[in-house]
Structure formats: C-alpha cells, structure tokens
Image (cartoon, helix red, strand yellow):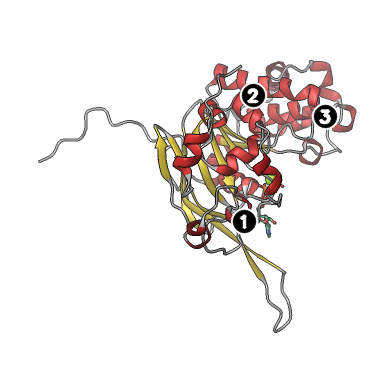
C-alpha cells in the first residue's frame, strides 16, 4: 500500500490547460458562401498562483481578450479546461465572486444612468457581502480602498475623469473580495499621466489583499513594471514565458524581441510590420513571415515549446540562437 504524500502542494489558483477557442466569422450566409474559422486562441496552458501578477502581452488580435473572457467565463472554450483552485466545475455564481474582470473601457463598463454608489451597492448585496445596515460603511470603504473620496459616490460616470472611472471599476470588482482579477488593458485608454497610478493601485491591492492579477496589455514595458511573470502571445499561442525581468532583458523569441523594440536593429526595418493574424491555419511557425531569424524549417514545421533556461520557455526553432544573441541588460 502506498501512502499519500505528507504535504501535497495546493493546486494553483488558476490552471489553464490546452485551451482553444475558434470563432466562425461571416454569420449565417446563404448557400455556397463560406464562413471563415478563426482560431483566436490555440492550445494555451499556464498556471497563475495566489497573490501573483501574471502579464499577458501581445499585439492587437493575438487572442488576449478571448483568453481573458474565457477565464472570466464570459466566453466558453472550444476545447480545454480552466480550473480554479483545482476545480473545473465551480458553479457560475461562486466562480464570478472569486474571479472578477476589469475592462479596458471604464465608460463602457459602467452604466451611465447609475451613480457610483449604485455600482458598488449592487455586487455587495448580490453576493451578500453587506447587509442593509453596514452597506454605507462598506461602500465608503471601497472608495477608500481605491483612493477615491467618498463625496464622489453620488456622481454619475460622466461626472468622473477616466482615471476615477477606472478606479470605480476596480472598486466594483473588489466588492466581492475576489481571489483573481482579470484586468484587460485596464490603463490603455487612460491618459499617460494616470496610468502609473492605476498600476500602483493594482500592485497595492495585490500585496495588501493577496489578490492575484492577470494583467493584459500591449505594452511589454508596463508588464515588466508590474508583472512577476510574462506570457507573450502571438497569433493565439503563447510563444514565450518566463519571469518579467529576464524575458524583457534577454528575450528568447524573435517576436518578444520585436515587441521590446529597444535596440535599434536594421533587421527590424526589413521585417514587414503586420497585425498578428489569429487563427490563420499556417504551416510552420505563424511568425515566420515576419521573423528576421526564420530559416526554411520555420516555414514548414510548427515549433513546440522548448525550455531555454530555468523557467524560460520559447516556442521557436531558433530559440537558443535568439537567446544567445540577446544582450543581457542590467536593469535600470
Ligand atoms: N466574438 C467573436 N466573433 C468572431 N471573432 C472574434 C470574436 N472575438 C474575437 N474574435 C477574433 O479573435 C481574434 C482574437 O481577438 P481578441 O479580441 O482576443 O484579440 P486581442 O489580443 O484582445 O486584441 P486587442 O489587443 O485588439 O484587444 C481576432 O481575430 C478577433 O477578430
Ligand atoms: Mg483585447
């Protein structure tokens, strides 16, 4: 008889396993007209731990929001499983109180007809986080949490600045004391001067409350600023992953190198700049047409993920070469 391990490590907060999502584009077309299948997300797997920030980085159309929406249960995966603390069958209501989403556009995600107070009251009552008696204090405490004055409670979204609106959206997410917040480009619509403040707020909430964040962005520099770990996505796949500093300082995938774009390099000028095409059923590596390091094999054989260094993965036939030629830059 085998005995159970003494202290089995707890499952990760979030485990995304072989998740794919295909969309049919073209709607219901009459006979003969074809619809296109878009593979927005392909075989994505990763884990996210309690209190961790994981940054998901990539250019427009690479599948970031689709991944976010699947994790928030707003879109169903076509295949694959998403587990929360080891369970893939958490009931929707419970799941939504444990996993919250903050969207890019705080204007779109807040109802213009309702006050800030209404936006914060609803989730508190719906998820039984407050009683009528302690509601005013709980609503006020949420405003304190995100650094907004309580007098703003009676304003409508259009009476707030963009930064204030995004703070209200974050306060609303925190009304249910989530374990994970999926933040889909939470600062990209904000004035540059306000971005750091909102990122600092997320970091403060992570450290003080132990909340995990999946931070989605185009901007690899902000991912480095915030992210303990980075996943780089291209054409629906995770093409590189690893700790933020090492990934940015010494990328192991030519696409990450292109995203960083920090070192002037004539090869980049030669590479045609195109939008990431999610789902194109290409043979070979989806990045090959843009890749300055591509060789024949890249156009015929799709690369698998290889570990180039401890905790560093790259989906590239030339990963070792890219890694070897990336200068190790000392963080400033
Ligand atoms: N509901 C949908 N129906 C059809 N196609 C969709 C749908 N949602 C996303 N797609 C397609 O899936 C691909 C990935 O889209 P997604 O929104 O996930 O990208 P993204 O990385 O978030 O881009 P962005 O940075 O512009 O927000 C795109 O080609 C998009 O057109
Ligand atoms: Mg998006």
Q: Which mark is nearer the camera, 3 or 1?
A: 1
Label 2 to label 3, Cα distance in Å? 16 Å
Measuring from the top left, give residue 152's x and y in whole percent. Answer: 83, 21
268 over 147 or under it: above or below = below
Q: Where residue 154 appears, x then y in whole percent? A: 85, 24
Please state if 120 lies on the left or on the right of 15 as rendered. right
Q: Give the residue drawn at x 53%, y 60%.
A: 299
Where in the image, quadrant-wise, is ligand 2 located? Answer: top right
196 or 161: which is nearer to us?
196
Q: Choose top left, top right, bottom left or bottom right for residue 280.
A: bottom right
Residue behind mark 2? 202
Choose between 192 and 282: the one closer to the eye: 282
- The residue shown at (66%, 37%) is 265
Give whichever of discs 1 and 2 has the lower sequence position: 2
Q: Is residue 312 left or right of residue 140?
A: left
Give yes or no for contact between labels 3 and 1 (Cβ–Cβ under 8 Å): no
Q: Position of residue 159 (x, y in %)?
A: 90, 28
Disc 3 crowd rating (10 Å Cα; few below 14, some 14-19, many 20+) is some
Q: CA distance from mark 1 to mark 2?
A: 37 Å
Kindly report which numbered mark, 1 or 2, lies closer to the viewer in this rendering. 1
Mark 2 Cα within 10 Å, few/some/many (few <14, many 20+)? Answer: many
Residue indicated by mark 3: 162
* Marked residue nearer the N-terminal end (3 or 1): 3
Circle number at residue 184 = none
Q: Secondary structure at mark 2?
A: helix
The answer to which image quadrant residue 111 occupies is: top right
**Residue 230 appearing in the image:** yes
View extreme (bottom): residue: 31
Q: Which mark is residue 289?
A: 1
Callout 1: SS = helix
Asked if the residue at label 2 sits under 8 Å from ligand 2, the reply is no
Tell me how far mark 3 sits from mark 1, CA to CA: 39 Å
């Amino acid at each position: 008889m085998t005995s159970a391990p003494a202290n089995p490590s707890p499952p990760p907060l979030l485990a995304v396993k072989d998740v794919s999502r295909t969309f049919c584009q073209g709607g219901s077309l009459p006979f003969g007209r074809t619809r296109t299948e878009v593979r927005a997300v392909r075989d994505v797997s990763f884990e996210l731990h309690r209190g961790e920030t994981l940054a998901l980085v990539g250019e427009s159309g690479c599948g970031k929001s689709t991944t976010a929406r699947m994790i928030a249960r707003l879109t169903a995966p076509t295949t694959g499983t998403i587990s929360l603390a080891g369970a893939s069958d958490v009931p929707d209501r419970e799941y939504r109180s444990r996993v919250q989403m903050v969207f890019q556009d705080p204007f779109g995600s807040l109802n213009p007809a309702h006050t800030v107070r209404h936006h914060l009251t609803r989730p508190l009552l719906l998820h039984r986080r407050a009683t009528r008696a302690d509601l005013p204090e709980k609503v006020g405490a949420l405003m304190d949490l995100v650094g907004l004055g309580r007098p703003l409670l009676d304003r409508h979204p259009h009476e707030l600045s963009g930064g204030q609106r995004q703070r209200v959206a974050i306060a609303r997410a925190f009304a249910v004391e989530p374990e994970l917040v999926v933040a889909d480009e939470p600062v990209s619509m904000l004035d540059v001067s306000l971005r750091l403040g909102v990122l600092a707020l997320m970091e403060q909430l992570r450290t003080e409350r132990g909340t995990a964040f999946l931070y989605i962005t185009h901007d690899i520099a902000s991912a480095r600023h915030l992210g303990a770990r980075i996943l780089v996505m291209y054409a629906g796949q995770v093409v590189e992953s690893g700790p933020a500093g090492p990934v940015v300082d010494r990328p192991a995938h030519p696409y990450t190198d292109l995203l960083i774009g920090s070192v002037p390099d004539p090869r980049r000028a030669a590479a045609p700049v195109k939008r990431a095409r999610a789902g194109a059923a290409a043979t070979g590596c989806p990045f090959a047409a843009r890749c300055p390091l591509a060789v024949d094999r890249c156009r015929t054989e799709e690369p698998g993920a290889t570990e180039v260094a401890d905790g560093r993965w790259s989906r590239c036939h030339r990963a070792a070469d890219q890694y070897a030629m990336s200068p190790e830059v000392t963080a400033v």
